[in-house]
Image (spheres, rainbow, N blue to C red):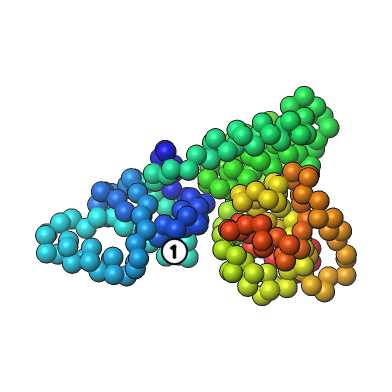
Amino acid sequence: MQFATLTRSILLDLQSKGYNILTSKNRIDDENPTWYPISVPNVWDYLLQLDGKTKVMSFQEPAVLVIEDALLNVEDQQLDGQVFIEDDHNLRLNQRLHIYNQYYQFVANPEVYDFSFDPQRLIIRNYALHTGDHSMYLDYLQLHYPEHVSVGMKDLESLTRSLICLDSTQAHNWFMMHNVAVIESDIWVCDEDAILKVLAVQGDDYRWNISGDTEQLIYNRIAPQDLLPMHDLFWIDSRVRKEI
């Protein structure tokens, strides 16, 4: 349990866990509110009841943020405050780094890896996308790949804005709507935190090899129909390119 800076990534993560409102003891005009996520059966009813209470009791209007509205209408730089979260992304980060290092030995043999195939970079990037904290990824690029800092950070910021989280029905419909043929994960495809990128759509001339092998822990390629039974939630890079 910890407080984290409110970002779009945090909002997506909270929404995926069933929260739909951020409430605060701060007033609506406070510059740095402290937020607490809650789940209410009906957002509109909750807001009406809250409005009625503030008028009857002559309370100061409290700060309230509807998560869905914020995701649709508010940019990252417009979000303020700290939000209380129970999920420990730092613990999962350290666990992944340990497990993946046992498999890839990137600590002992860093010279084997480059920017395009670096498990440690992908794990830190995944952490940045889920938490909205980009500082660790920036530090990693500056230390190991200074020539990729500008492009790498621009891509991270673009993906942060484009990242969506869908349940299995929504994901199935999204894959169908975009004629998705092949998906590629960043980290292990069986991990629900994996970020899924559209690698190919129906009708592409190039034929991607789909091995179905999930023993590799990064860059797994899979067809949508094989992916859907694996997860309850799907974190998708919604930037579908016409030319892959």
Secondary structure at badge 1 equals helix
Who's the residue at 87% across and 58% down the image? 209
Location of residue 94 (image quadrant): top right
- Label count reads 1
Along the horizontal axis of the image, is 118 left or right of 137?
Answer: right
**Mark 1 Cα-neighbour bin, 10 Å: few <14, some 14–19, many ≥20:** some
Location of residue 163 (image quadrant): bottom right
User: Which amino acid does the dot numbered 1 rest on?
Assistant: Glu
Q: Is residue 67 visible?
A: yes
Who's the residue at 69% across and 34% down the image? 99
Residue 120 vertical position relative to residue 215 in the rendered view, above or below: above
Residue 51 spot, x, y in % from top left: 21, 65
Who's the residue at 71% across and 35% down the image? 100
| The N terminus sits in image quarter | top left
Taking the view exactly as shown, the residue that stands out farthest to the left is 57
Residue 136 spot, x, y in % from top left: 59, 36
Q: Which residue is mark 1?
A: 68
| The C terminus sits in image quarter | bottom right
Taking the view exactly as shown, the residue that stands out farthest to the front is 229
Residue 193 spot, x, y in % from top left: 61, 49
Along the horizontal axis of the image, is 31 left or right of 60?
Answer: right
Location of residue 126 (image quadrant): top right
Residue 61 spot, x, y in % from top left: 21, 58
Along the horizontal axis of the image, is 100 left or right of 8?
Answer: right
Q: Is residue 138 visible?
A: no
Who's the residue at 77% across and 24% down the image? 108
